[in-house]
Image (cartoon, helix red, strand yellow):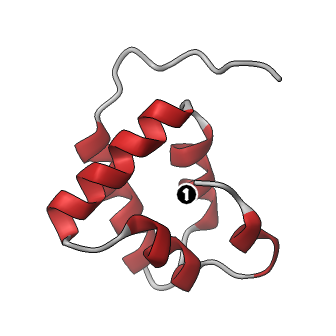
Amino acid sequence: MATLLAPEDFSPGEDAMALNKAFEDGGTDGKAIIWILGHGNADQRKQIRLAYQEIYLEDLNKKLKSELSGDFECVPY
């Protein structure tokens, strides 16, 4: 399996806020979620989860589960 190169300008807080915006903009923005979670490695996704929890006092995994449906529900985050 290929390893993703971590973006140099990575900001878990900004990514957490962008995810929250993707949840709120008149329905879930699946493309934004894929872009944010798909362009980082496992460590970065963990940092995003922790930042989301700190900012919104909500578990990102549970939020994703409630917002996503169909095949997206099976995506590891």
* Place of residue 64 in the rendered image (x, y in percent of width and height, measured from the top left): 52, 72
Q: Nearer the viewer, residue 29 or 1?
A: 1
Instruction: Give the residue at x 25% y 62%.
Output: 53
Quadrant position of the C terminus in the picture: bottom right
* Amino acid of disc 1: Ile
Question: Would residue 37 be found to the left or right of residue 18 on screen?
Answer: right
Relative to the observer, which residue lies in front, 22 or 71? 71
Q: Residue at x 58, y 15 (%)?
A: 5
Residue at mark 1: 33
Q: Secondary structure at mark 1?
A: helix
Q: Is residue 69 above or below residue 44?
A: below
Identified at 62% across, 52% down, the residue is 34
Image position of 2 (left or right of 38): right
> On screen, 70 above or below 57?
below
Residue 65 on image: x %, y %: 57, 78
Q: Position of residue 25 (x, y in %)?
A: 41, 77
Q: Between 33 and 64, which is closer to the camera in this rendering?
A: 64
Rendered image quadrant of residue 39: top right
